Amino acid sequence: MKNVLIIVSHPKKDSLTMAMAHQFKKLSEGSGNNIEFIDLYKTKHQQSFFSFENTNSTDITPEVEYFQNAISKADEIAFFFPYWWGSFPAILKNFFDCNFSKGFAFKYVNSMPKGLLTNKKVKIFTTTGAPKFFYTLTGANSRLKNMIKKQIVEFCGMKLDSCNIYGSVNTKNKNITKILNDIKNKV
Ligand SMILES: Cc1cc2nc3c(=O)[nH]c(=O)nc-3n(C[C@H](O)[C@H](O)[C@H](O)COP(=O)(O)O)c2cc1C
């Protein structure tokens, strides 16, 4: 039994991203895991854009406390988002800015960063409008994967378990059933 935190970043309730997250939740629950499901656009713990006066003391607001608690409890964190402008939606970037703060997610030892979120696995699920072959060929998919792996996941001491990038999603949506079926291999 694992504690699984699902973070979804899509404004539309009937998006494929949301359907994938619900499919994952259902399957992971079925395997006996404890699930916490957070929809960043709909949560009542909304956070405004990150700002600070002093880099060494970010404010612990009730929202930061809520999200950091959820992160601390999780053995596994699964992120679901659509691929926007070569990256993830701004609301997810803000989630990292606000909650993966110094002293909580990492610290510096002799000027070197040390991740503090050890023993956590991360799974990434995203969909692109572009075909997979094209983004594999141009390096767009590996850039996204490496950025997440090196700059976020490993920087904070976590381990990237899988990075699932599904292509050709906004063309004729022919592959939706295939994508939803594939989720069962990723739980
Ligand atoms: C603001 C915005 C930016 C996007 N940027 C990209 C992009 O850089 N590359 C790409 O292949 N598709 C891009 N798309 C298309 C989305 O990735 C695609 O619509 C999405 O994966 C479909 O999944 P959904 O049904 O969950 O929204 C973009 C869409 C939007 C709305």
Image (tube, rainbow, N blue to C red):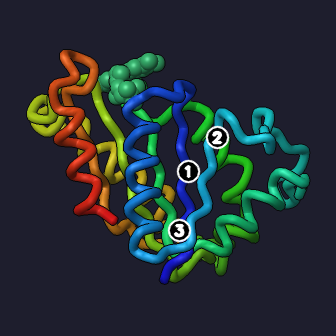
* Residue 67 visible, this orientation: yes
112 to 26, vertically: above or below: below
Q: Label 1 sits on what residue type?
A: Ile
* Residue 83 visible, this orientation: no
Ligand 1 appears in which quadrant? Answer: top left
Q: Quadrant location of residue 167?
A: top left
**Horizontal and vertical percent for residue 51?**
82, 39
- On screen, residue 127 versus residue 51, left or right, reads left
11 to 151, vertically: above or below: above
Residue at x-position 42% and y-position 52%: 148
- On screen, residue 86 versus residue 58, left or right, reads left
Q: Quadrant of the C terminus?
A: bottom left
Q: Quadrant location of residue 178?
A: top left
Q: Which of the labelled discs sits on residue 100, or is there none?
A: none
Q: Which of the labelled discs sits on residue 7, or is there none?
A: 1
**Horizontal and vertical percent for residue 7?**
56, 50
Q: Label 3 sits on what residue type?
A: Val
Residue at x-position 38% and y-position 66%: 160
Q: Are marks 2 and 3 in contact (CB under 8 Å)?
A: no
Q: Label 2 sits on what residue type?
A: Leu
Residue at x-position 54% and y-position 80%: 118
Which residue is more in the foreground, 113 or 17?
A: 17
**Horizontal and vertical percent for residue 95?**
66, 46
Lower sequence index among marks 2 and 3:
3
Q: Are marks 1 and 2 in contact (CB under 8 Å)?
A: yes
Label 3 sits on residue: 4
Which residue is more in the foreground, 100 or 16?
A: 16
Label 2 sits on residue: 40
Q: Does dot 1 land on a helix, a strand or a loop?
A: strand
